[in-house]
Image: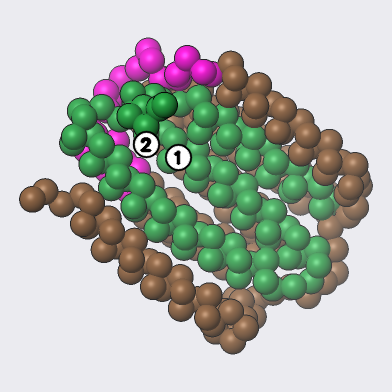
Amino acid sequence: MLLNQFLLLGALLFAVGVYGVLARRNGVMVLMSIELMLNAVNLNLVAFGLQHDVVSGQVFALFIIAVAAAEVGVGLAIVLLLYRNRKSIAVDEFDLMKG
Amino acid sequence: MVAQNIAFGIIAGITVLAAIGMVSTRNIVHAALFLVMVLGGLAANYVLLTAEFIATTQVLVYIGAVMVLFLFGIMLTRAPIGRIPQMTGATWPVAALSALALGGITVYALIDRFGTDSLATDNTVFRTADVSDSVFSQYIIPFEAVSVLLLAALIGAVVLARRD
């Protein structure tokens, strides 16, 4: 197996996640795309850990999984609060801070 | 080696197609199910990379817990279950251009730097015991920090979402 096949898969998934974050209107969909990007990074960490013969790659992947779980919890609470206050979770309608 | 490469090809194809489906479908529940396919494909990739504990954690935490959170989020925000015409904002061409540029640059840089380096498969295979040894010795302080972070996120989510 090549190292690059995993890195390229990670890069493609990350690019798809970037598109999702920038293009989707639904707040829950934006959070899902962020999960996609975090997972692409995890794949890179595990592949490099195997390549360089260190266990740190797997440990960092575990930390990222934990942080991503916390992020989803708080993010969905914020989306829920937005829905309760504005009856909408379309992210392009929240432009109160636009100059 | 050949069997692993064939397996990787199938898994990677399914994963990328499911990811593209996730960001392009107009049905939000379908998007969540596509995300399950992506996460499952990545778990299979971790098994190929001999990281079986990460694969197990991926299935338990992501496909188990995080997906339930997402489905609850979809349900509680009363998203329409059927097709939604306005799923992507007006900025989607800019978003597609940015994603294509980023992906193109990254792919070019990776091919330029790593080319056809083969994965060092004769290295040590890290078992779950090695991972836990590392977490509880070298990375004990980040581990405790993550514990506090999870507690803070728990309290924060409750404070944000409760009605008063």
Query: Would residue B104 be seen by someone viewing this image from the given angle?
Result: yes
The spot of residue B133 in percent (x, y) is 60, 84
Rendered position, A10 above or below B16: below
Q: Quadrant of the N terminus of chain B?
A: bottom right
Q: Chain of mark 1?
A: A
Name the quadrant containing residue B79. top left
* Residue A28 tag number: 2
Give the side of residue B6 with respect to residue B47, left or right: right
Q: Main secondary structure of the magenta part?
A: loop
The spot of residue A74 in percent (x, y) is 34, 52
- Tell me the crowding category of disc 1: few under 14, some 14 to 19, or many 20 or more residues within 10 angstroms, Cα based: many
The spot of residue A67 in percent (x, y) is 47, 60
User: Residues in magenta?
Assistant: B69-92
What residue is pinned by disc 1? A32
Q: Residue at x 81, y 47 (%)?
A: A4
Disc 1 vs disc 2: Cβ atoms closer than 8 Å? yes
Rendered shade, chain B: brown
Rendered position, B73 above or below B153: above
Rendered position, B47 above or below A16: below
Q: Which chain is green?
A: A
Pick out the residue farthest to the front.
Answer: A99
Q: Residue at x 33, y 23 (%)?
A: A93
Colour scheme: by chain
Q: Residue at x 63, y 39 (%)?
A: A13
Q: CA distance from mark 1 to mark 2?
A: 6 Å
Is B49 part of what is drawn in magenta? Answer: no
